[in-house]
Image: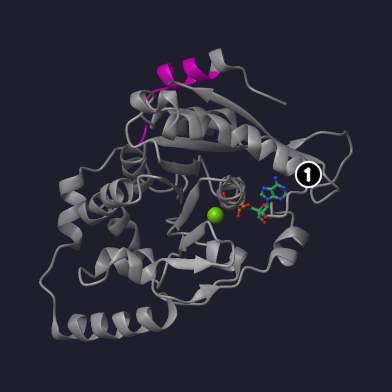
């Protein structure tokens, strides 16, 4: 199953905006407050935890387990998933670093999103990260920003520790304090970190904007993949889409209604390259959900 390019472009152009996009200022003011003594103490504890767990230490990725769970893993095997993600990553890398890079602002910041939860954002983000990490000359930073359903740490079996939310909430933390190195040499991860009642607001805050700018410039040779909340579930993800340079939009082929897809696409900036990944495409009739290789991803791109 696939969706043709012309129709997707017109979906983006025609569909009316239904959610209100919050202003950066309104969101930022929600998270700005003077630090308390408790905060200072917590920051110190955070730093200590960070130096224990994050810096220098290399987190072991259980490749065999990931492989068993259907994820793409290093090792050069020519699987169907590897082939699909090769097709998905090409235009993204071209937009980020190739001849098209001059036309795409912040091209190395790639947001992975979808209309609603459960469509395969984490599956796509992890596989895309694995696929790009297998490139000779590319380093990948995978950031878990899906505040409602953070799962990157679970999929990669990462130790609990500070992450994105801690970084956004605590000025004394640096990217290096929360970024994990892994046994996949070209793969770095920033997990979600601790639960925070204002997590979603922090995503749309001025600190997130600063962080995205920092990631883009400090790691300009690096692909940053942001596993993001679904567009129709939180308005913060629309703000996030404004900060990313490219958007990978995952559609669960068999389940998501065209209305949801239209509504979500209409909220994204159509001038950015938006790649559509059709996930869980039923390739053979009668195949079951977790059947052997019965699902795949199609890829289409809109914009430039
Ligand atoms: N192409 C696929 N093949 C097999 N399982 C998949 C595929 N895409 C997603 N899944 C599974 O479906 C569930 C939801 O996917 P997930 O990536 O967690 O969704 P999201 O991040 O969008 O909420 C997970 O259990 C995931 O492993
Ligand atoms: Mg997810």
Q: Which residue is drawn at 63% across and 22% down?
A: 3
The outermost residue toward the top is 6
- Residue 2 is left or right of residue 18, and the answer is right
- Residue 116 is left or right of residue 46, and the answer is right
Q: Position of residue 42 (x, y in %)?
A: 26, 83
From the viewer's perspective, is residue 182 above or below residue 73?
below
Q: Where is residue 272 in the image (x, y as percent from the top left)?
A: 38, 27
The outermost residue toward the front is 136
Q: Where is residue 33 in the image (x, y as percent from the top left)?
A: 13, 68
User: Which element type, helix, strand or loop, lies under badge 1?
Assistant: loop
Quarter of image, res 199: bottom left
Q: Where is residue 209 in the image (x, y as percent from the top left)?
A: 25, 49
Q: Which of 39 and 79 is in front in this view?
A: 79
The outermost residue toward the left is 34
Q: Which of 20 and 145 is in front in this view?
A: 145
User: What colour scheme was applied to this rendering of the protein?
Assistant: one colour
Q: How crowded is mark 1: few (under 14 residues within 10 Å), some or many (20 or more)?
A: few
88 in the magenta segment: no
Whether residue 255 is visible to the viewer of this picture, yes or no, is: no
Whether residue 140 is visible to the viewer of this picture, yes or no, is: yes
Beta carbon at label 1 within 8 Å of ligand 1: no
From the viewer's perspective, is residue 34 above or below residue 256?
below
Check the picture and name the quadrant holding the N terminus: top right
Q: Which residue is drawn at 87% across and 41% down?
A: 287
From the viewer's perspective, is residue 286 above or below residue 193?
above
- How many numbered tags mark residues here? 1
Residue extent of the magenta highlight: 8-19
Mark 1 = which residue? Answer: 79
Quarter of image, res 178: bottom left
């Amino acid at each position: 199953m696939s969706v043709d390019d012309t129709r997707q472009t017109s979906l983006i152009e025609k569909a009316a905006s239904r959610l209100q996009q919050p202003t950066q200022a309104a969101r930022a003011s929600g998270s700005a407050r003077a630090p308390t003594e408790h905060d200072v103490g917590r920051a110190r504890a955070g730093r200590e935890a960070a130096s224990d767990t994050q810096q220098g230490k290399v987190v072991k990725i259980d490749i065999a387990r990931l492989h068993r769970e259907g994820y793409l893993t290093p090792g050069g095997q020519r699987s169907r998933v590897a082939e699909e993600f090769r097709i998905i990553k090409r235009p993204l890398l071209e937009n980020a670093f190739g001849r098209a890079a001059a036309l795409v602002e912040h091209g190395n910041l790639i947001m992975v999103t979808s209309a609603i939860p459960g469509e395969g954002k984490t599956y796509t983000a992890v596989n895309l990260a694995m696929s790009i990490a297998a490139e000779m000359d590319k380093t990948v930073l995978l950031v878990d920003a899906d505040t409602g359903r953070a799962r990157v740490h679970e999929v990669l079996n990462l130790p609990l520790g500070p992450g994105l939310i801690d970084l956004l909430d605590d000025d004394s933390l640096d990217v290096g304090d929360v970024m994990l190195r892994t046994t996949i040499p070209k793969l770095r991860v920033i997990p979600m970190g601790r639960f925070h009642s204002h997590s979603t607001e922090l995503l749309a805050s001025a600190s997130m904007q600063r962080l995205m700018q920092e990631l883009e410039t400090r790691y300009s040779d690096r692909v940053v993949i942001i596993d993001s909340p679904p567009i129709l579930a939180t308005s913060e993800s629309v703000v996030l889409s404004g900060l990313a340079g490219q958007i990978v939009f995952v559609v669960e082929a068999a389940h998501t209604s065209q209305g949801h897809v239209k509504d979500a696409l209409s909220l994204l900036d159509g001038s950015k390259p938006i790649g559509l990944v059709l996930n869980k495409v039923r390739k053979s009739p009668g195949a079951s959900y977790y059947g052997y290789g019965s699902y795949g991803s199609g890829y289409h791109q809109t914009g430039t």
